[in-house]
Structure formats: C-alpha cells, structure tokens
Image: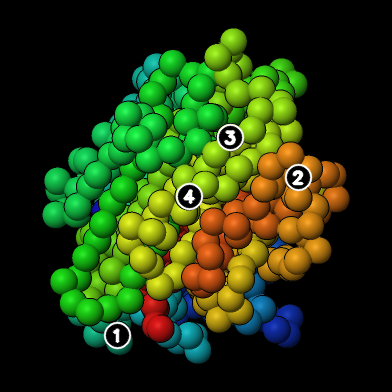
C-alpha cells in the first residue's frame, strides 16, 4: 500500500497531494517547500484557516494553472511548533489516512518535509506506520452500504526530493511491517469470543508457521494433564472449548540469545464462579490481547528474520466460564512445577494460565529473557488510566530496554515496583500462595504472583489491561482494540542486545 515514488508532486494526477507545514513561531504564515502552494497557504493564513497547528488540515481543490498541481485535492497538514519526534509523524500519517478515507481518495502522494531537522528515514517509517494503522477498519460483520463500498487507500506514495530511495524504501518496510502487526493484533481482538477461541489462536499459529518456516507446537489438554498444568486446566474446567498452549519458535540456527514472549490468551473472561457484573462483560472478549500481541509480533519477526536473536512465542489460551465443573473459590490447584495455589477468586485467572506457561517455557526453552503481556488487572486502569501500560520487572536493564522500545513505538509504559513486601501479600495459610493479594497494589501483587514462575531469569511483565482497548485516542488509534504491545515487541527484537 505504501510506496516510495520519484514522481514530482506537480506531475501527480491522483486523488490527493499532501504537504506538511510547521507552525510559524512568530505571527506569520506557515512555510511550504512549494512556492505556488505557498500562495494558497498565505491566503488561507490571512483568513485564519491555515496556521500550521498540530494536525490542523486545510483541504484545497487546486487549479492546475494557479497551483501548478494536477492532483484532484491538495491537503496541507500542520505539524505544530513543538520539537519533532517519531510520534508526531505517526500521528500525521494517521491524519493522512483519516482524511483520505473521509473524501474517498484512493491514490495519495505525500511530500516528505525534508527541509525539517529530522531524519527522513524516521519520517518515512513513522508516516507509513501511521497511514497503515490509521486506515484500519473492522467491518467484517456489517452489511456494506452502497456509499461505503470499496473505499480503501489503494496507493500511498512518499516523495522525497533529496533522500536516497533504498533507505526510504527500507524505512517504509519497517513501518509497514510493524503497523500490519498492530492491525493483525486488532483483528484478533475485534473478533468475538465465539469466533476467536483457543483453537483460533492455534490455527493462526499453524498458518504463520507454515508460511514462514517457524516451528509450531500446540499443546492439547491431554498433554497438559500429563504435565500437571493445574493452572490452565483449572481455569478451563468450566468451559467446553478445549484449552491450548500455543508455541511458536523462530530460530536463527546460530548461537544467539533467546527471547521468550508470553501472552495471555483468555478468549473470554466471565470471571468464572466469581462472576463479573453483567455491565461491560462483553469487553472481556478482549482478554486475549496479550496473546494477540505475541502472535502478531511473531509474524513480524518471521517476516524480518533477524540474525541476532532467537524468539519464542507462547500463548496459553482458554475461556474462563462458570459451570458446575468450574474452579471454585477455596479450591487448591497445583501448577506446572508443583507450586500449590489457593484460588480465592476465580476471576484472577490470568495469572494461573500464565504461571503454567512461564514455568513450562522457562524449562523447555531456557530463554535468556522473558517478556509477558497480559490484560491482567483492573487495578492498572485505576493507577495509570488508559494512557500507559504498567511495567514490572525483576531486571533493570530489561525494563529500560522495554521502556525505550515503547517510547520509540509510541506505546508508552510506566514502571511500578516489585519487592518482597508485595510477595508477602500473596502468602496463603493453606497453600504455597494464593491468587489474589487484597485490594492494595492489585497490579503489583499480580506481578508478584507471576514472578514465582520465572526463577531468576530476567523477566518483565506488561499489564496492558488499560491500553489494549480504550487506549488514548490518536489519529492512528481508533476506538476499540489498539493492538498495543505488538509494535513494542517488534522494536525490542529489532534492537535486542545482550
Ligand atoms: N481480565 C481481567 C482484568 C481486566 C479488568 C482487564 C478490566 C481489562 C479490564 C482479570 O482477569 C481480572 O478479572 N482481574 C481481577 C483480579 C481481581 C479478582 C484480584 C480484577 O482486576 O478485578
Ligand atoms: Zn478475570
Ligand atoms: Zn482476565
């Protein structure tokens, strides 16, 4: 969908030509690299219609003789006057997509503002990311009305007068791969719980393994029983959908570090016997967003084939349903590896399935580092709202790497502490640990529970309950699932050093 073009903007006769302008510091019109278009901007600025403010749009229907432009539409987008960063261009890409779809423009040429003091390759990468993510729609289950039919962005070309084509093409590819991973994660989350079942995770993994020569193994219930995975089996007890532990391996074939990614794949969380209130329960189909991020990231890793790191993706997948066979408050279960857990609340189920996956993955794959992602606690929404993912880690270096990857991807995180005091809260009188630690520090005690299953391996836990959906609205993030985590993981893999 995104291409690098060397067609001069004046020769482009497509649906929409896009320029970016900065807001002038002093009271003056924003400056455009094209002299004729500058006259348009000056006029609009005098009327107060084009100030260059961030994400402000001026849509013009140009005349070739006046503007020297053959395109059907001309869009001038403001970049504001703050410091330039990657997020600004990602958002700008989202604005391009939003406007283009609104006016049904299918062929768009975007002129890179190379005169600005910012690397053109970062601009190209982030604009591409923003355009792809910003044009994301999920309309699979709705009848198409005649008006909306076939409105897609067919071709968005980037034009840069001074930058080398191959470098820009590489940047576009990086941006596109990451954005498509985000879109894949959104697709999985948008699917309803009756469609996106544990089996759907398994089928997806098998499909990408086949397409990309990844190794895939799906552990079924019988083997879980044999291995005594009491966590995932316990949570699954009330469901008719069989549980799956989905495993994907990307191997370089060289002696390189191994990074293990684990995602909570709870395809519907009713709470189980500790049933959730009815209002809003439909949103619990999103309780698989950690798993979606891991699967989407694995697909991107398989496409990029990094040479410096092996990557393992693990998704424990099940529903959490009430039934006469379901886990009950007070039950004691034995996790993979032998730790016993007193189940106080069956709605704190994510940690039970993740505990098994972490312990098993650690033993089987012997990773050098582990990152898990999970919509784990409502408490993280109370603490950080929908604007930051909660990060907890037993290793500062790994935590810093993830913070940096989040910053580069525009998926911000905030670190919370982990310490012995929090582990105290989950001590049980009748078992080794219990599955909730009281009201106080709910996000951290959930992480303290997971920590029991990673031994001393560098590990980080991302609580994405607040950011996986209902995330801060941005031009490239619609309402609904955000696809959070996939791009951070891809960035982490791209820059992995150990
Ligand atoms: N899936 C939920 C967490 C969640 C809540 C995600 C709201 C997104 C939005 C998780 O399984 C859960 O129910 N956690 C409980 C834990 C409690 C019982 C200790 C919670 O947060 O209320
Ligand atoms: Zn729950
Ligand atoms: Zn849950």
Crowd class of label 1 (few under 14; some 14 to 19; many from 20; radius 10 Å): some
Answer whether labels 1 and 3 touch (C-beta < 8 Å). no
Residue 180 at what x, y percent from top left? 35, 52
Q: Tell me: is circle 2 under 8 Å from ligand 1.
A: no
Say whether marks 4 and 1 touch (CB < 8 Å). Answer: no
The nearer-to-camera label among 1 and 3 is: 3
**Do residues under tags 4 and 3 come within 8 Å of each other at their CB atoms?**
no
For label 4, the residue is 337
The structure residue drawn at horizontal position 54% and vertical position 71%, both measured from the top left corner, is: 456
Give the camera-side residue of 426 and 347.
Answer: 426
Is 299 situated above or below 47? above
Relative image position of residue 154 (x, y in whole percent): 27, 47
Location of mark 2 (residue):
428
**Residue lying furthest right in this view?**
440
Residue that carries the numbered disc 1 in the rendered image: 163
Q: Position of residue 271 (x, y in %)?
A: 65, 26
Residue at the (52%, 47%) spot, across then down: 338
User: Is 491 on the left-hand or right-hand side of 438?
Assistant: left
């Amino acid at each position: 969908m995104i291409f690098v073009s060397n067609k001069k903007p004046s020769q482009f006769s497509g649906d929409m030509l896009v320029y970016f302008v900065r807001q002038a510091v002093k009271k003056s019109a924003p400056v455009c690299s094209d002299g004729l278009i500058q006259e348009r901007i000056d006029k609009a600025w005098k009327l107060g219609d084009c100030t260059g403010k961030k994400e402000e749009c001026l849509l013009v229907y140009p005349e070739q003789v006046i503007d020297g432009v053959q395109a059907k539409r001309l869009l001038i987008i403001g970049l504001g006057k703050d410091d330039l960063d990657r997020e600004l261009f990602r958002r700008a890409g989202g604005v391009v997509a939003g406007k283009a779809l609104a006016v049904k423009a299918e062929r768009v040429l975007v002129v890179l503002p190379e005169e600005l003091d910012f690397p053109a390759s970062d601009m190209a990468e982030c604009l591409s990311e923003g355009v792809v993510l910003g044009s994301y729609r999920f309309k699979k289950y709705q009848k198409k009305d005649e008006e909306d039919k076939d409105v897609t962005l067919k071709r968005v070309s980037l034009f840069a007068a001074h930058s080398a084509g191959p470098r820009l093409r590489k940047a576009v590819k990086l941006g596109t791969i990451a954005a498509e991973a985000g879109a894949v994660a959104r697709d999985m989350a948008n699917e309803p719980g009756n469609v996106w079942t544990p089996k759907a995770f398994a089928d997806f993994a098998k499909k990408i393994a086949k397409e990309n020569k990844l190794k895939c193994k799906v552990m079924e219930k019988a083997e879980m029983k044999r291995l005594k995975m009491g966590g995932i089996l316990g949570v699954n007890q009330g469901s008719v959908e069989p549980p799956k532990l989905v495993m994907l391996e990307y191997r370089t074939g060289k002696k390189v570090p191994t990074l293990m990614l684990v995602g909570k794949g709870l395809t519907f969380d009713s709470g189980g016997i500790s049933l959730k209130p009815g209002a809003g329960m439909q949103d619990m189909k999103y309780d698989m967003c950690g798993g979606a991020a891991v699967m989407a990231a694995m697909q991107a890793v398989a496409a990029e084939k990094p040479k410096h790191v092996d990557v393992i993706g693990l998704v424990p997948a099940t529903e959490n349903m009430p039934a006469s066979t379901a886990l009950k408050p007070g039950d004691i279960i034995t996790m993979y590896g032998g730790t016993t857990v007193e189940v106080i609340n069956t709605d704190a189920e994510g940690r039970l399935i993740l505990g098994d996956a972490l312990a098993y993955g650690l033993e089987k794959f012997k990773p050098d580092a582990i990152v898990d992602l999970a919509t784990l606690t409502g408490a993280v929404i109370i603490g950080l709202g929908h604007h930051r993912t909660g990060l907890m880690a037993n290793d500062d270096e790994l935590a810093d790497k993830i913070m940096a990857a989040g910053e580069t991807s525009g998926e911000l995180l905030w670190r919370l502490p982990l310490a012995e005091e929090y582990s105290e809260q989950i001590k049980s009188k009748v078992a080794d640990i219990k599955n909730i630690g009281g009201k106080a520090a709910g996000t951290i005690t959930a992480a303290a529970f997971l920590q029991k299953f990673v031994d001393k391996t560098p590990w980080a836990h991302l609580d994405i309950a607040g950011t996986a959906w209902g995330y801060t609205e941005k031009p490239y993030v619609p309402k609904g699932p955000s696809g959070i985590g996939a791009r951070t993981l891809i960035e982490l893999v791209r820059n992995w050093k150990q």
